[in-house]
Image: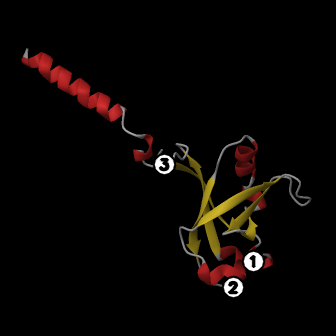
Amino acid sequence: MRDMNRLLACLLIGMSAWAAPLHAEVAAHILLQDVPLAGFQYHAGRQWWSQMRVGDALTLIREPENVHDPKAVRIEWQGHMIGYVPRRDNADAARFMDNGQVLVARISRLAEGRDPWSRIRFEILVPLHPATTAD
């Protein structure tokens, strides 16, 4: 009887863990790329530089109609265009986005310097679990 009670207790504990609310899940991502921002010197990056912080969210916007690069992925910070995923590195992000995959991006490094290619690095991440909201 004691073994049966122990088995029943383990079963109930397991069921309660399984029934935990979805919003309690930890967000997890796979790092797709960590790359420098292309075009910083041509877009609004300089204007907003002093307000940017490591960890800030970036928005990726696919530009399949871009006349310079059909795989172009534009980068925005708080609604301001600051550059692009470098042409040499944009094929994977473009393919994921074209297939409907949600990608997340954030600033991974900010550095003072004259070289515009070394000013901002950012990460592109693939979420493992879609974001959920509590009811």
The answer to whether 18 is drawn above or below residue 117 in the figure is above
Q: How many marks?
A: 3
Q: Secondary structure at mark 2?
A: loop
Label drawn at residue 1: none
Q: Residue furthest right?
A: 67
Q: Amino acid at mark 3?
A: Ala
Q: Secondary structure at mark 1?
A: loop
Drawn side of residue 66 relative to residue 86, left or right:
right
Q: Amino acid at mark 1?
A: Ala
Drawn side of residue 23 relative to residue 131, left or right:
left
Q: Secondary structure at mark 3?
A: loop
Q: Amino acid at mark 2?
A: Arg
In which quadrant is the N terminus drawn?
Answer: top left
Label drawn at residue 28: 3
Q: Residue at x 64, y 84 (%)?
A: 113
Q: Residue at x 78, y 75 (%)?
A: 43
Q: Determine the image quadrant of residue 40.
A: bottom right
Label drawn at residue 44: 1
Residue 76 or 111: which is nearer the viewer?
76
Q: Position of residue 14 (x, y in %)?
A: 28, 29
Q: Residue at x 13, y 20 (%)?
A: 5
Q: Determine the image quadrant of residue 9.
A: top left
Mark 1 burial class by Cα count in 10 Å: few <14, some 14-19, many 20+: some
CB under 8 Å between discs 2 and 3:
no
Residue 78 or 109: which is nearer the viewer?
78
Q: Residue furthest top?
A: 1
Disc 1 and disc 3: Cα gap in Å?
A: 31 Å
Q: Position of residue 106 (x, y in %)?
A: 59, 63
Q: Position of residue 56 (x, y in %)?
A: 57, 68
Q: Position of residue 13 (x, y in %)?
A: 24, 31
- Residue tagged 2: 114
Which-is-in-front pick, marks 2 and 3? Answer: 3
